[in-house]
Amino acid sequence: MAFHSAISPQETADRLAIRELIDAYAHCADRRDAKGQMALFTADTRFLVFMDATAAVPTQELHGRDSLAPVFDNLNTYETTTHFNGQSTVSLDGVRATAESYCLAYHLSVGEDGQRTLMIASIRYLDELVKQDSGWLFAERRLMVDWTETRPSAA
């Protein structure tokens, strides 16, 4: 945990902008705005998914902003989603930063028979960020699934 005796206005602005970037990712996911979500990443981004956070090798690895479209479009398989962002830590180094943030993601599915199923995922994002002219962007995002639970959901 970092202790800040004094924070410059620029550091405050950078920390706020990074938190807004993290929140914008969740907002775009829940609104099914794949293009908006993709715009939060650098053109040469890396996106790694670890369905088991303890695995040494990612389940999926994507390179480049354009490769993200199918992943973000996959959210359309759910009736609705809600991502709750929790705590985050950020380490700034000029125009680069690293961050770890926590998220509980709720994914509601409705089967052809009308059966509702709720999948909850506990996710940690490990991010490398870069500040460009347009602001802070994800240069690399590691999606780490710590656990999931799937259960029936009442209407």
Image (cartoon, grey):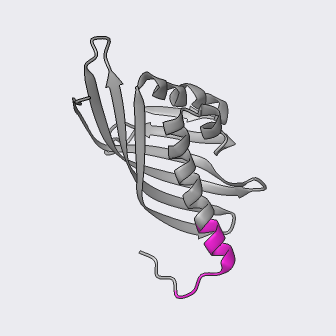
Task: Based on the picture, tell me whether residue 8 belongs to the magenta stretch.
Answer: yes
Q: Residue furthest top?
A: 112
Residue 87 screen position, x and y as percent? 41, 62
> From this viewpoint, is residue 6 visible?
yes
Q: Can residue 58 be seen in this view?
A: no
Q: Is residue 40 magenta?
A: no
Count of number-bearing discs: 0
Magenta-colored span: 5-15
Q: Name the residue located 46 percent from the left edge and 77 percent from the top edge.
A: 2
The quarter in which the C terminus is drawn is top left
**Is 141 placed left or right of 44 in the picture?**
left
Query: Could you tell me which residue is drawn at 68 percent across and 69 percent down?
Result: 94
- Tell me where residue 19 appears, x and y as whole percent: 55, 60
| 124 lies left or right of 12 | left
Residue placed farthest to the front in the image? 155
Residue at image coords 27%, 27%: 117
Determine the main secondary structure of the stretch shown in magenta. helix
